[in-house]
Every structure is written in C-alpha cells, then in structure tokens.
Image (cartoon, rainbow, N blue to C red):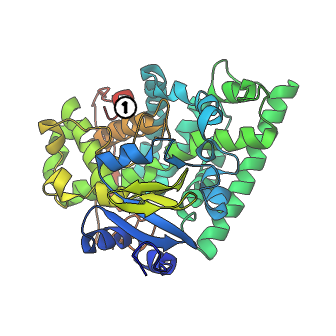
Amino acid sequence: MDVLSRPLIDRTLPLLAEGYAWLPNRMRDSTGPVVRTRLLGRPALALRGPEAVRFFYDERNVRRHRAIPEPVLATLFGHEAVHTLDGDAHRARKALFLPLLTPDRVAGTVDRVTEAWDEAVPEWSRRGSVVLFDEASTVLTLGAHRWAGIPLDDSDAGAVARDMIAMVDGFATAGPRHLRARRARARQEDRLARLVRDVRSGEGAAPADSMLDLVCRHRDADGEPFDEKKAAVELLNVVRPTAAVAWFVAFTAHALHRWPQHRAPLAAGDSAFTTAFAHEVRRFYPFAPFLGGLAARDLMWRGEWIPAGGLVVLDVYGQNHDESLWGDPYAFRPQRFLERPAQRDELIPQGGGDPATGHRCPGEGVTLGVLEALAVRLARLEYTVPEQNLTIPLNRVPTRPHSGVLLTDVRPPAGRSEVRVGRGAEAVR
C-alpha cells in the first residue's frame, strides 16, 4: 500500500483538545511546512508559508462554498454569508464591504469607537474595578453600530455586546458556549432583520450611504436584493468583527503589563511605533488557529496529493509564529515591524491574499485602525493591575487572558489631547 492510499486517522478530537498547538505540533513532526491528515471525516492537507497563502487563496485551487461547517455558520458567520461564496457571487457580495477599505471609512469607524471609549472611561473611574475585555466589547459594539448607522440605545449596548462576543466565543467548541452562540446569533439576526424591514417599508430610516443603507439597497450577482435574513447576516458581519477587537484590546493590556517599556512610545502618540505595536499584538497573540477550504480539483502541493473536495487548511497561528519568517517568533518585539514593514502574505492574523478581491477580511484595516487608537488610549490611562489569573490557555479557541484583564483604580488621563494614529486602511501591504 503506497503512502497516498493509506487510511488516515481522523484528528478532529485531538484538534479540539490541543487547540492552537495542534497543527504547529504536527508541522514540527513533518519534513516540511505541510501535513497530511483527516479532519471532520475528510482527507486534509495543512500548509504554511507565503507561497502556501498564495496557493490557498487561488480560487482555481481552493473554494469556500460548502467548506465552512454548519456549526460555524450558525454561530460565527451566518448562513449564506459572504465567506461561503466563490467566483462572481463572491466578488459581487464583496463589493458591499469594499467601503470598509477606504481611509475615510476606516477613520469614521475609529472616530465612533474612540468617542464611545472616551464616554465610558469616566464611568469606569467611578467603579472599584472593571474587566477590560467586557468593557471594551461594549465600547466597540456601540461604536460599530454608530458608524454603521444601526440604532442602538446606550442602555442596550452591553446586552448586544454579550451576544456579539458569544458568537465568536462559541464557534469552535461544543456544549454551553456553542449553544449560547447559536441563541445569540438568532436574537441578533431577528433584531437586524426587523430593522431592515422597517427601513424598506419606510417605518425606519437609514443614514445615507451608511452600511445599513448600503445593505438595504445591495443587489447580489443575480440582480436580486437581499432578503431580510441575508441582510441581517451581512450587517452582523460588519459589526461583529469590530466587537471582536475586544480580544486584541485585552491582549494589548496583557502586553503592556508584561512589557511596560512599550507604554511610553504609545502614550506619546508615536505613529510608526503604534502601527508596529498593533501588528505585533495581532501576530504574537492567538486568535484564529487556521483557515479551511475545499480542494476545487485534485491538487498537489510539495509532493503531497489532496483529492477534489478534500480539506485544505492554512496554518494561521503556526505561520504567525514561524521561526523562518520571524526569527524570534515567541518574543514580543514590535520593533520587528519598524525594521521591516509587514508583508501581505507573511502576516496573516485575518487571512491572506488581496482583501479587495479575495477572502482576506475586508475589515482588517478597521481592526488595525481601531486597535492603534485604543492602544494609545490604554497606554495613557492610569490604572492598577491587581493580582489575577492572566494566563492565556492555548487549548481554548478563541482564547484570551483568563481574567479578562481586571483593572482597578482607573483614572482618565488629565488634559491630554488625542493624536490620530489610525492608518488601518494601509493594513498589510
């Protein structure tokens, strides 16, 4: 029996047990940046590296249609979302999100989020303590809704934020977290579908050229407008990823606690350093473990075969910690991005390829711009980090500091004018 015909043992359960470490561990045991295995009952080929990114994002090789498991669609992305499409259908739907790439739109999102942050901080100072992850998720949810033109009362922002976080927190697991994620998505899809119906009937209004307005007017490749459910799904795919920046805000606080020497250049508003710091947070800390698609045809990669319909897996966490790319990958060193700018197919915390035409997240510029602005604000904030459990378990996906980063004695910065540092539209060249 040759190597291509040997049965492969399904590794789904070890993946669930090991989390982020599973695929990098398999890569270390292989002879190159490629692993043949079986996941979810399918033969799978896992790969890593800039050349692998280009291979993975070539639609002649890998497709997304029917590649995303139902549990992920029912929690993270939504059924019939842009992530599930290929070819002309994907490009037509992606056009809806292209405004997210423009500098003005990025700046607008940053402004709405920082406005919500600045409103929240005085209230934090009146409390004895706050959990930064929770507070950041509320700020981000409120700011994203304001920018997208989606009405949200301040008093409801916390509950909506909890649903946004639940959708992300429960997509890669079973049990209570997953059930919470399903219920959260159902609630929020219903809320936004009602909003779309009201706007289209004239009972509600959408600010001109807002994302709400664009979604309500969008027509897909078939020339048909969205039904209300699909419109709600894509509105969530605008505001949910912005709320998920809460993970990176918590990681930023973790980094400033462990390496406090970075606080001064951030607080000073050093634009180049701030961008480098934001890139390093996104590279160093774990968020997406990997991305998957289906082989569009029989494929061969580095001498390894994968049949049409087999899984092709891009090792995101492993690539962002690949010694051949980063030299000292487990050192938190923002200076690396001052020495050499981030390259598109090397740094892939939110996927690779061209965000304008491919499946790389079009909101990456928003993530980067918001993270830059909040990193500066966090560096300028005065607070105490009491004794707590700040461990970041790699067997939990998505992971975060165990405590959510508890802050006490929060004090707003006195008399400090803010400096615009958001350059997120440049994202990764």
- Quadrant of the image containing the C terminus: top left
Residue at horizontal 19 percent and vertical 51 percent from the top: 325
User: Is residue 17 among the parts visible in the rendering?
Assistant: yes
337 left or right, relative to 370? left
Q: Which of 161 and 304 is in front in this view?
A: 304
Vertical relation: 415 (above or below) 75 = above
Q: In which quarter of the image is the N terminus?
A: bottom left
In percent of width and height, residue 217 lies at 74, 24
Asked if 401 appears above or below 14 in the picture, the reply is above
Residue closest to the eye, 11 or 411: 11
The residue located at (64%, 44%) in the rendering is: 236
Tag 1: amino acid: Gly
Would residue 224 appear left or right of 241 to someone viewing this image?
right
Q: In which quarter of the image is residue 408?
A: bottom left
Point out residue 272 in the picture as x, y percentages from the top left corner. Answer: 20, 31
Q: Do we see residue 391 in this rendering?
A: no
Residue in the picture at 43% in, 62% down: 305
